[in-house]
Image (spheres, rainbow, N blue to C red):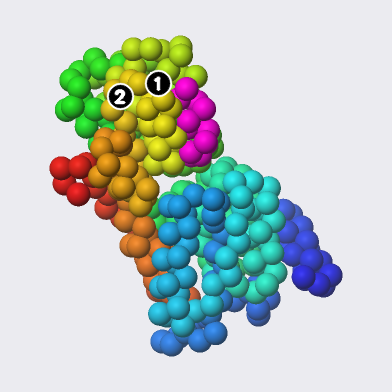
Amino acid sequence: MNKITHLLIAALLLMFLNGCSLEPPSWAKAKSGEELKDVRIGLSMSTLNNPFFVYLKDMVVQEAKKQGFEVIVVDAQNDSAKQNNDVEDLIQRGVDAVLINPTDSSAISTAVQTANLVGIPVITIDRSADKGDVASLIASDNVVGGKMAAQYIIDQLGEGAVVAELEGIPGTSAARERGEGFHSLADTKLNVVVKQAADFDRTKGLNVMENLLQGNPNIQAVFAQNDEMALGAIEAISSSGKDILVVGFDGSADALQAIKDGKLSATIAQQFDLIGRKAVQTAADLLQGKTVEKYIPVDIKLVTKDNM
């Protein structure tokens, strides 16, 4: 990063705040035409300490390689401030498009708006951004997935079952939407006695679940908003000697193995490969000047031992 680039970004931002406009610099303009050459895509992941996001990253890189694109991958390590800095760095490195898996849907808005300012298209994957012009969001229908989890618990245990919920990182669209879908059914059909954030993390899922079991010994089922928390929860449940139904969300390899082993009851499986492929294909369409859908949904599926 050179000083001139920093000054350019600062000047552009200042003019934006003052209501002015400026033609983006040549290095920031998207490529167009029938054939794309020398395309460089920036990929900002919320964390690579989660198997789901590692696999999603791999799918993006794999599809980009097929298209002949270069991908620069950065890991925010679940730090929203770092992610904003990461995206700014990608912009200064002259990427043609940015794919962002937001750590925080609100905090990432600053980075999205900075990319908008210099004419670099932004695509969000798995999670949305609250503000800024996002060309397309490619994600599973989290609301439907949350509702599927609630329905599965009802089908297995009946209405009125005592349920705990492990929530993801506060501020992420995925956590909000999965919770929304779950409660749209659970609030009238189940007895949700407690919910607590475990930040999509396996160790936190274990620790939070241990505490919840101590305060709520009658829990019959758990909905964890991702598989990592679900896997942590089943460790805590196993240590307690209780028999509790657990539903996760993602369909990670570890979760599928846990279902095979009879430890995890079910997961709402996302299609990682499709999300990754569609993200790169959408970027290619944008760079060729094509119109893309603002929201590209990817199907999900309830996976249990019976249908694996």
Up/down of 221 relative to 214, above or below: below
Q: Position of residue 36 (x, y in %)?
A: 47, 84
The type of residue carrying mark 1 is: Ser
Foreground mark, 1 or 2?
1
The type of residue carrying mark 2 is: Ile
> Is label 1 in a helix, a strand or a loop?
helix
Residue 240's tag is 1
Up/down of 83 relative to 221, above or below: below
Q: How many marks?
A: 2
Q: How much space separates mark 1 and mark 2, taking CA atoms?
A: 10 Å
Residue at 51 percent across and 86 percent down: it is 37
Residue at 32 percent across and 31 percent down: it is 246
Residue at 39 percent across and 36 percent down: it is 230
The answer to whether residue 200 is magenta is yes
Up/down of 265 relative to 1, above or below: above
The answer to whether residue 187 is magenta is no
Query: Which stretch appears magenta?
Result: 199-210
Query: For this view, does 35 lie left or right of residue 83?
Result: left
Query: For this view, does 226 lie left or right of residue 12?
Result: left
Magenta stretch prevailing secondary structure: helix
Residue ID for mark 2: 244
Image quadrant where one finds the N terminus: bottom right
